[in-house]
Amino acid sequence: MHDSRHASHTPLPVFDWDAVYRGDTSDTTAPDPLLLAPADALTPGRALDLGCGAGGNALALAERGWRVTGVDIAPRAIASTRASACARGVELELLVADTALWQPDTTYGFVVSSYALPPRGPARTATLATAAAALAPGGILTLGEWDEEGCDWGERGDLVTLDEIRTHLSGLGLDVLRAERLRVPVHRHPGHEQEPADDAAVIVTARKPHDTLDTSD
């Protein structure tokens, strides 16, 4: 694993994600049913939560029988996920790592990325490539991000466009099954209670074709 605290050759995001979290069970929010819905049609196997935050989605997948790996750049986010997993008696593999640098050593039947992509640029491109590479043939990726064309906040490049994500994933050899813009609830972190109740999002679901060679062990 590439621990983000030692990846000094790559600039870290300007925003301090670690400051968002308290590092305990109070951080963990409810899972996102919209992003996890595609997993319901799959046989539980290995799942990857890329940019897992405090672990709401990772915990829900594990409770449904998936063997889950959660990766996040913020040590306190991972601490929160670990605390919640211990409290619920759930086993997870948890890694503190920059999603733009980390490379999986296995493949996954389901990959989720929940509002966790880096700003537009090399780091975002690398993270999307990692998500695609992590999929086993026939595996499903589901991704949610805030919509640059529908939100009135954030710096240009921090958010995404539907065409951008669809083009990226198609270029990585994935079949885009669903791509839409819609309004979704905003998950509030402790201390951020003034966020709006809902906002504009981009939701994309894609599959790795079955004829793709799987080189994992």
Image (cartoon, grey):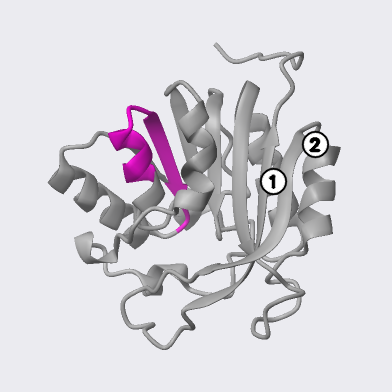
The front one of 10 and 105 is 105
Separation of residues labelled 2 and 1 (CA atoms): 8 Å
Q: Is residue 23 above or below residue 114?
A: below
Residue 68 image position (x, y, % from top left): 39, 33
Amino acid type of the residue tagged 1 in the rendering: Leu
Magenta-tinted stretch: 58-73
Residue at screen point 23% across, 44% down: 85
Residue at screen point 32% across, 44% down: 59
In this rendering, position of residue 189 left or right of residue 115: left
Residue 140 image position (x, y, % from top left): 61, 32
Dot 1, crowdedness within 10 Å: few (<14), some or many (≥20)? many
Asked if the residue at tag 1 contacts the one at tag 2, i.e. Cβ–Cβ closer than 8 Å, the answer is yes
Q: Is residue 32 above or below residue 49?
A: below
Q: Earlier in the sequence, mark 2 or mark 1?
A: 1
The front one of 178 and 51 is 178
The front one of 170 and 11 is 170
Badge 2 marks a residue whose secondary structure is loop
* Residue 12 visible in the displayed image: yes
Amino acid type of the residue tagged 2 in the rendering: Leu
Q: Which residue is mark 2?
A: 172
Residue 144 image position (x, y, % from top left): 60, 56
Dot 2, crowdedness within 10 Å: few (<14), some or many (≥20)? some
In this rendering, position of residue 73 left or right of residue 180: left
Residue 81 image position (x, y, % from top left): 30, 51
Say the numbered circle drawn on residue 128.
Answer: 1
